[in-house]
Image (spheres, rainbow, N blue to C red):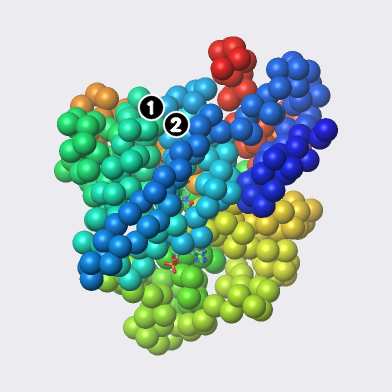
Amino acid sequence: MDIMEAIKLRDPGEREFHQAVYEVLESVKPVLDRHPEYRRMKILERITEPERVIMFRVPWFDDQGEIHVNRGFRIQMNSAIGPYKGGLRFHPSVNLSILKFLAFEQTFKNALTTLPMGGGKGGSDFDPKGKSDNEVMRFCQSFMTELFRHIGPDTDVPAGDIGVGAREIGYLFGMYRRLSNQFSGVLTGKGLGWGGSLIRPEATGYGCVYFASEMLATQNQSIKGKTCLVSGAGNVAQHTVEKLIEMGARVVTLSDSSGYIYDEEGMDKDKLNFVKKLKNIRRGRIREYAENYPRSIYTPADPASGFNPLWNHKADCAFPSATQNEINGRDAQNLLVNGVKLIAEGSNMPSTPEAIAAFLSSGIQYAPGKASNAGGVAVSGLEMAQNSMRLRWPREEVDQRLRTIMKSIHKACLDAAEEYGKPGNYMVGANIAGFVKVVNAMLDQGLV
Ligand code: NDP
Ligand code: 2IT
C-alpha cells in the first residue's frame, strides 16, 4: 500500500498531519529513487511515526475556585540528531493532528539549523485569553507537574509557540526547577536574568527577514523600500516588523484572530512599541491600533467569506506570521494579483497546498516556514549551548550567529533544489536538505 494511504488509514482525521507529511513525501520522491536503501530500510514508515507520544490530564483551579480539566501533550518525534526540541502551544484548537504536524515539520527545520537538535512539539487546548496571571500560573504548574518526568536538558527541551511566551516559560521553568531540584537548561526562551539568551525573543522574526533578504539578494534586490504585509501580532509578527522597519521596508498590516489593521502610511518604531505594549502587557486586541492611529483601518475577521482581506492589498512581500492554513488558494491568487513577489513564512504551514501550488507555478519566490522561520529554534539551540558553557554571549554575537545560520539554511535549500533539478524551489530544497540529514543519522544508528 502507498505510504500516504497507510498513514491516513491509521490515523484518519489528522488532517494537518497528513498535509505536512504529504508535502515532504512529494518533495523527497527523487531522493528515494536515488537511494533505494531508504525504501528498503522503511525510512518513510519510521520517520512519520513519532518515537513517543505523551498525553495527560491537566486539572487546575480558576480564580473562582472552579475546577477545569485540559489536555496536555508532548510529541517526541525524532531524536536521531539531538534531544527532542520544539515549542509548546497553548490554544483551544490544539489536538494530536496539529501537534504531530508541528513536530514533524520541526524535525526537518531543526536539521536545517546545523545545530544538534531532534524534533518535538507539545502543548494544550488551554486558552490563555482572558485568564488572570494567577490562573495561567496554576495551569502552567499543573502542566509541568506531569511534563517534567518526560523532559530534561539532554532529553527534550521545550520552548514557546502560540500562547506560550516569556510569562508562561517563567512559570513552567519555576515548577520544573522545584520538582527536579535542578537548575538546568530544560526550557529555552528563559528570562535574561536566569539563563535566557539575548536575541531569542527576536530570533524568529529577525531570522525570517534575514532569510527574505538572502532570497532578494539572488535577484539583486533588497528589502529597502518594499511594501510588506505581515499577519499576526504576536512574537513572530512583532519582530518581523521590527527588522523590516530597521531595514527600510514599509509594513502596512498586522492582525489577530478578531481582525486586521491596514496602515497605508506604514509602521514606525513608535507604532510598533504601541503594538508590543498592547499585546505583551495589556493583552488587548489589534482593533485598538486603529483607534489609536485613526488614519489606519480596522476590518473584523469574517471566516465565512472564504478569504482573508489582509492578503488583498498592493504589496511586494508577504510574511504570514499567525497560524497554519492562514493563506488559502483564493488568498494566494489575491496576493499574486496585487503584485506580491516574495512570501517568507514566519508561521508554520501558513499556506494551504493550493496556495503553495499557485506560488510555485507563478514563479514568485516562496520560502516554507521550516526554512524561513528556523531562526527561533536556531537561537534556542544557541541558548542551550550557552547554558552548557555557563556563560552568555553578547547581543551582537548571537545576532551574527543567527545571520550566519539563516544564510547557511538559504544556501542548503538552493543547493538541494539545484541538485534535484528544481532550481530556486525553496520548498523542495528545504524538505530534501532536512530529510537527508535526519535519514542519514537514522541509517547510521541502526533500527531503533
Ligand atoms: P503568539 O501567540 O505570540 O502570536 C500568535 C498570533 O497569531 C496572535 O496575533 C494570534 O491572535 C494569531 N493567531 C493564533 N492562532 C490563530 C488562529 N487560529 N486564527 C487567527 N489568528 C491566530 O505566537 P507566535 O508569534 O510565537 O507564533 C506565530 C506562528 O509562528 C505560529 O505558527 C508558530 O508556530 C510560529 N513560530 C513561532 C516561533 C517562535 O519562536 N515563537 C518559531 C517558529 C515559528 P490571537 O491573539 O487573537 O489568538
Ligand atoms: O516552531 C518553532 O520553531 C518554535 N515554536 C520554536 C521552537 C524552539 O524550540 O525554540
Q: Residue at x 59, y 12 (%)?
A: 446
Q: Considering only vertical position in the picture, is 71 above or below 186?
A: below
* Badge 2 amino acid: Tyr
* Badge 1 amino acid: Thr
- Is residue 48 visible from the viewing direction of this image? yes
Identify the residue under disc 1: 155
Q: In terms of depth relative to the viewer, which is nearer, 30 or 266?
A: 30
Image-quadrant location for residue 379:
top left
The reply to whether callout 2 and callout 1 are in contact (CB within 8 Å) is yes
Q: Residue at x 41, y 75 (%)?
A: 286
User: SS of the residue at dot 1?
Assistant: loop
Q: Which mark is residue 84?
A: 2
Q: Considering only vertical position in the picture, is 245 above or below 74?
A: below
Image spot of residue 122 (x, y percent): 44, 44
Few, some or many residues within 10 Å of mark 2 (<14, 14–19, 20+): many
Using residue 167 as the reference point, say whether residue 193 is left or right of it.
Answer: left
Q: Earlier in the sequence, mark 2 or mark 1?
A: 2
Q: In terms of depth relative to the viewer, which is nearer, 166 or 51?
A: 51
Using residue 408 as the reference point, say whether residue 71 is left or right of it.
Answer: left
User: SS of the residue at dot 2?
Assistant: strand
Where the N terminus falls, by quadrant?
A: top right
Q: Marks 2/1: CA distance?
A: 6 Å
Q: Residue at x 48, y 84 (%)?
A: 297
Using residue 430 as the reference point, say whether residue 190 is left or right of it.
Answer: left
Q: Residue at x 76, y 34 (%)?
A: 3
Image spot of residue 138 (x, y percent): 24, 55
Mark 1 CB lies closer than 8 A to ligand 2? no
- Is residue 133 visible from the viewing direction of this image? no
Image-quadrant location for residue 134:
bottom left
Q: Considering only vertical position in the picture, is 207 above or below 400?
A: below
Q: Which mark is residue 134?
A: none
